[in-house]
Amino acid sequence: MPQQPSPSSRSKRKITVAAVEDFPPGTRMEVQVGRAVIAVFNIDGEYYALYGRCPHQSAPLSRGRLQGTVICNAETGWETEWAYDGEVLVCPGHGMEYHLKSGKAFGYTFKLRTYEVVVEEGQVKLVM
Amino acid sequence: MATDAQSVKVQKVEPSFNPVQDEDLDQYSDELAEYTIVDVDVHVDDTLMFMLDYMEGHFRKRLETILQVDFKGEPGNSLRNMIAHIAWLGSSYDKPPRAKLASKQELLKRMEKGIIDYSILFPSELLPIGYLPEPKWAAALATAYNEYMVDAYQNLAGIKIAIVVAPQYPERAAEEIDHHAGHPDIVSVCIPDVGVNPPIGDQKYWPIFEAAARHSLPICFHGIEALIHDNYPLRVAHFPTLMQVNSMGFPFTSMLQIMSVVCAGIPVRFPNLKFAVLEAGLTWMPFIMYRLDAAYLRYRTELPALEKKPSDYIRAWHIGSHELEALPGRGDLVKLIELYQGQNTTMWASDWPHLERDLIAGFMRYDMDENLRRKILGENALRFFGLPPQK
């Protein structure tokens, strides 16, 4: 009987999200794969994908506004500063904030899962 | 890792500039279809402009003047926004915009989904009347609100109304209860409890309890962010940010009023009167019950009217689940409810459509047996408000 490949050795699936021309900068897509929901964003021609449900109460993160946020830490001399302008995804449920590029939740110790996005033959593809 | 067998669905989406509403009901529609669901804390647009037609004399003149005011772009028809703007100018620039109050059409659309069997309407803009300094002005607003709500929301399937009373004018409050109690869509008396001074167990308020008991109408205490009043708890002087006052104002008020009612012996004097607390979360319930029990051991003689220990009275209080605290473990909500023995008294509440409303996913994520879930989602509320089951 042939051996089943271990999960880590399986090749990841590439899921077509949209043609490049249908997914221009400033737009976003919600991709549902089985039960998982992924939010994919095009920011100035770069694609970012992260887990699409807020762990607080499951609001759809694909619909969050992108803006900046305030930070206050040793690097700012403990002064409050506006930062990450355009990179902060604000949950449309209750306002939790996530760094779009890393999935890190501002003010919390967890991060959302992020996914690789590639462009192949004019198609934007989610790798998972 | 995704497998080839999994279905894929892609849709283009737009950012939402208002908090998402109701999609959680769609998300859980199949699962929820089996349950009787009573949302015990729902708000509709009750801004002051709707009260105008129900005001008379100099109070009407006063309201006309207020409606011309503009506070930083917020029209003068919002009592809450006026107060909030005075207290915290621009403090929430980094959060989603304030949720709009729901119109009647939006409420009906939500009900037409067929998932929620009953929505119990509570005041929104009128919640600060508990700390308005003029008893007659507060009472006039309450009267106008109640008449407006009956006119606008009676005879609608699944819609029930809690009238509001101004606690600082107990005699008028009792008249208000007498006037509306016979209406089939009036199911509760709401006492806005923040800023009420002295606390609500004081003998001056007993006409309110007598009237509610006379008509077997349950009393619901509904909090609000403590804002600019001078009374306990937590005016602006104590808390410089809205986050602090919002998180502590509701439970501190609720604990104060529960303690006040129980220590005044009101449950003994009015044994059939039912009480509930809304919008204060749940986690403080074990604290107030057993903290009072501990002190009761030493100070029982101060409370000679009590026939049993405080927690034996408080256990009968019902409690709305909103704003549901984010407990870390999926089994933690059941543990908490076991601590305050609230299996038959905890009622699901959303606070829809306010910004801090709970999505039902926040409740469904907690593990519990079906019997308890059924009670919290609807059965406890059916019994508390005296509503017939719809399913």
Image: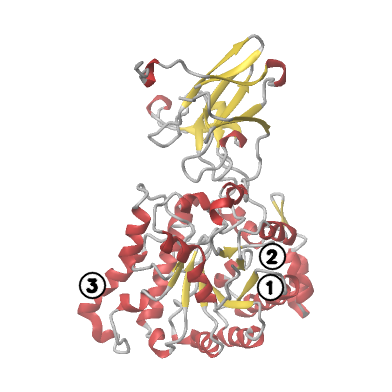
Q: Chain of mark 3?
A: B
- Tell me the CA gap for discs 3 and 2: 42 Å
In what element is the residue under mark 3?
Answer: helix
Q: Earlier in the sequence, mark 1 or mark 2?
A: 2
Question: How many residues crowd around disc 1 within 10 Å: few (fewer than 14), some, or many (20 or more)?
Answer: many
Amino acid carrying mark 1 in the image? Tyr
Residue B228 sits in quarter: bottom right
Question: How many residues crowd around disc 2 within 10 Å: few (fewer than 14), some, or many (20 or more)?
Answer: many
Image quarter where the N terminus of chain B lies is top left
Circle 1/circle 2 CB separation < 8 Å = yes
In what element is the residue under mark 2?
Answer: loop
Q: Chain of mark 2?
A: B
- Residue closer to the observer: B139 or A118: A118
| For residue B266, above or below residue A42 | below
Give left or right: position of A10 versus A27: left
Q: Which residue is mark 2?
A: B46
Do callouts 3 and 2 point to residues on the same chain?
A: yes
Q: How many marks?
A: 3
Q: Position of residue B57 (x, y in %)?
A: 77, 80
- Asked if residue B194 shows in the view, the reply is no
Q: Position of residue B56 (x, y in %)?
A: 77, 79
Amino acid carrying mark 2 in the image? Asp
Question: How many residues crowd around disc 3 within 10 Å: few (fewer than 14), some, or many (20 or more)?
Answer: some
Q: Which residue is mark 1?
A: B145
- Tell me the CA gap for discs 1 and 3: 41 Å
Do callouts 1 and 2 point to residues on the same chain?
A: yes
Residue lying farthest left?
B298
Residue A67 sits in quarter: top right
Task: Name the mark on residue B294.
Answer: 3
